[in-house]
Image (spheres, rainbow, N blue to C red):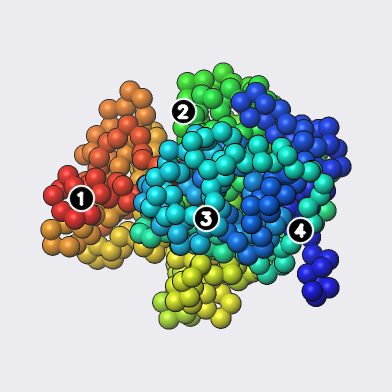
Amino acid sequence: MPTAARTFRTYVEKNLDALSADPAREALVHQGRRISAGDFRALVHRFAHALHSRGVDRGATVTLLSGNLPETLAARYAANLLGARVNHLYNKLSAESQADIVRDVETRTLIVDPRYAERAAEVAELAPVPDILVLGPAKLGADLLELAAGQSDEPFASRARPDDVCTIRHTGGTTGHPKGICTTFEQARRFLGGPPQQPEYEPRQLVCTTLAHGAGNMADGTLYAGGTVVLLDDFDPGTVLATLARERITEMFLLPPLLYQLMDHPDAPYTDTSSLRMVTYGGCQASPARIADAVRMFGPVLRQGYGQNEAGAISVLTPEDHDPARPDRLRSAGKVLPGVEVAIRDESGRDLPTGEHGEVCVRSAMIMKGYWKQPELTADVLRDGWLHTGDVGFLDDEGYLTIVDRLKDMIVVVGGHVYTTELEDLLNSHPQVLQSAVFGVRDADRMEQVHAAVVRAPGSDVDEHRLRAMVCAERGAMYEPHRITFVEELPLTDAGKPDKKELRRRAGQEAGTLA
């Protein structure tokens, strides 16, 4: 084996080292359980020995169908320690979609949360796998906890190599067949960075979105920094607020729609959130008006991260940049990170000057290895070392990057095109609007029409006519929505993004046309 591979240390080993430094410290909290760093480390090694005894080894695929359990993290660490690839399913996908992914990634072992045992049985019937292990007693498979209890907690030597695939992370499946994004062990290690820095405070991270998404990576960083990860099973604004105060949470990750729900909850003004040091948001476009409200509510603790699973982190809008008096700055995704190159290009691949809109193209060490078993699609987005993100944006004179839309979401209308996020920003600026989602729906003539779903503030009497008049006055007739529908709440994907595919389906159904 080459020297580089022999001396290489994975993100798991680095985290296990950090856990060993203070084994008595509280590492994980879940439903009243408080797990020490030493106990969690021992569980990871026991899981690794148990998985290896069941035939899991380097190059195999382990798929997780699990909620936010401490054992979920331990299973991921153990599988990666063996050099296995890990695929974490989104729990709210259909059984058919989950089975497609299980089959696609050539799952060797399916690890299941007991709460999802019935769904696992459905998936396994559609896509049989060699081995099913459950994180507790269940009617199917073997109990991994029981198997692990009979194993040693002696350190299991990592079998992973730098260029091996560490994770296969799928897109949410909201735009057709999900794509499997391959990240290597070297890239996963880079995410943690260098030696952990002594933090100014004891990090206590709240995970209230799925561990299969960005919160999972952030949990790795918190454990590496010597902090505590507090796990909630799902996002509920009242529960999140109560947990923030009770557990003295210092940081958390939220998608913008969930941040808005937190702000709008009746308990928010009366909850002690003074422990917060960093509220990271991202994953979809944010409303400058609502983010300004969040700064006023929580203080100078907001940070926006822009990136993609395919590209890694691209830019950051720091807390210092979150000035409520600068909506143009709040509209941006911040400055490009060190080590990342960004170019704005037109359809022919020509670099565009400052201020012009084009596709955001990225080059860095964090670019994905490729899409799992989809070489043509990989070649389409990865060209000459540059990832074509599919996002439309521009760079300003100060180097701030602004994202205006997804190429596929941009609505082509007579006279030009409508950037959905710009229209959402305008609608959200109305004092009686809490949230909105803009999307295109084809009419009977297959022409795209601009539709908007709007969540009104409590007691609001704003109607479609007034909103359309505001849009027409501010942006002109081209941006005026063909239809505005008022909804109690926006449907969200499993990751917490507005589900525009579902909104498009509903609108098309109502109109009697294909969405």
473 or 448: nearer the viewer = 448
Kindly indicate whether the residue at mark 4 contacts the one at mark 1 (C-beta within 8 angstroms).
no
Where disc 4 sits, the SS reads: loop
The type of residue carrying mark 4 is Ser
Mark nearer the viewer, 1 or 3:
3
Side of 325 relative to 275 (left or right)? left
Q: Decide if residue 225 is in sight here.
A: no
Where disc 2 sits, the SS reads: helix
> Which of disc 3 and disc 1 is earlier in sequence?
3
At a point 32% along the width and 31% down the height, the residue shown is 488
User: What is the spatial separation of the Cα atoms under label 1 and label 4, in whole angstroms?
Assistant: 52 Å
Q: Is residue 438 above or below residue 311?
A: above
Residue reaching furthest to the top: 270
Mark nearer the viewer, 1 or 2:
1
User: What is the spatial separation of the Cα atoms under label 3 and label 2, in whole angstroms?
Assistant: 47 Å
Residue linked to disc 4: 158
Residue linked to disc 1: 508
User: What is the spatial separation of the Cα atoms under label 1 and label 2, in whole angstroms?
Assistant: 30 Å
Quarter of the image with the N terminus is: bottom right
